[in-house]
Amino acid sequence: MPKSTKNYMTPGGWERMREELHNLVTKERPALTQMINWAAGNGDRSENGDYIYGKKRLREIDRRIRFLTKRMENAEVVDPVLREATDQVFFSATVTVLRGNGEEQTVSIVGVDELDLDKGHISWISPLARCLLKAREGDVIVLRGPGGEEEIEILAVMYVDLG
């Protein structure tokens, strides 16, 4: 995402990201640095697998810490429970749609870091979410994709806790 774009997140997604950052900073990184110091004391570092692996893993952890910190700094948390009742689709909405093939599908529009297709959580920048945004319950939208156009009817719009 461009730097000027807000990183929209649900409260649950922000909390999971905060927990991961806390775990990396307070548990994984200190334990790893202790192991690296022990391995460094064992002599020749050029052939010391524990030392080489530890340094590589430390770089990965530091990279992840920087990424999470930046994502959280740019985060704009949107709580669907606090949104006033509306039949219009906005970020954090849970939407039930009738696909062109006659199949009903329920999706929740979440942040890019919260994507989970098994739970029906789609990113707000995905093609389907972009078509749904600002549409209203009862509207029929057209999703243009590589397989052609598909008409999708919006059956229900809810704003519920996404955990």
Image (tube, grey):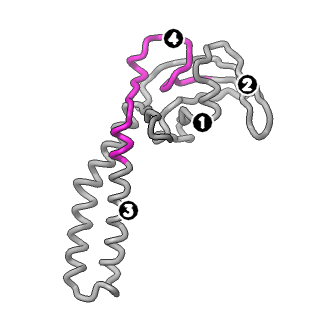
Mark 1 element type: loop
Residue receiving disc 2: 142
Q: Which mark is residue 86?
A: 4
Q: Amino acid at mark 1?
A: Ser
- Magenta span includes 106: no
Residue at the spot x=47%, y=20% of the render?
159
Q: CA distance from mark 1 to mark 3?
A: 28 Å
Q: Does label 4 or label 2 sit earlier along the sequence?
A: 4
**Between tags 4 and 2, which lies in front?**
2
Number of labels in the image equals 4
Residue receiving disc 3: 60
Q: Which mark is residue 28?
A: none
Q: CA distance from mark 3 to mark 4?
A: 43 Å
Where is residue 149 drawn, in percent x and y?
78, 30
Where is residue 93 drawn, in percent x and y?
51, 23
Q: CA distance from mark 4 to mark 2?
A: 22 Å
Residue receiving disc 1: 126
Residue at the spot x=64%, y=17% of the render?
155
Kindly indicate whether the residue at mark 4 contacts the one at mark 1 (C-beta within 8 angstroms): no
Q: Amino acid at mark 3?
A: Glu
Q: Residues within 10 Å of mark 3 (few under 14, many from 20)?
A: few
Q: Does label 1 or label 2 sit earlier along the sequence?
A: 1
Q: Does label 1 or label 3 sit earlier along the sequence?
A: 3
Kindly indicate whether the residue at mark 2 contacts the one at mark 3 (C-beta within 8 angstroms): no
Mark 2 element type: strand
Where is residue 33 drawn, in percent x and y?
23, 67
Residue at the spot x=64%, y=26% of the render?
131
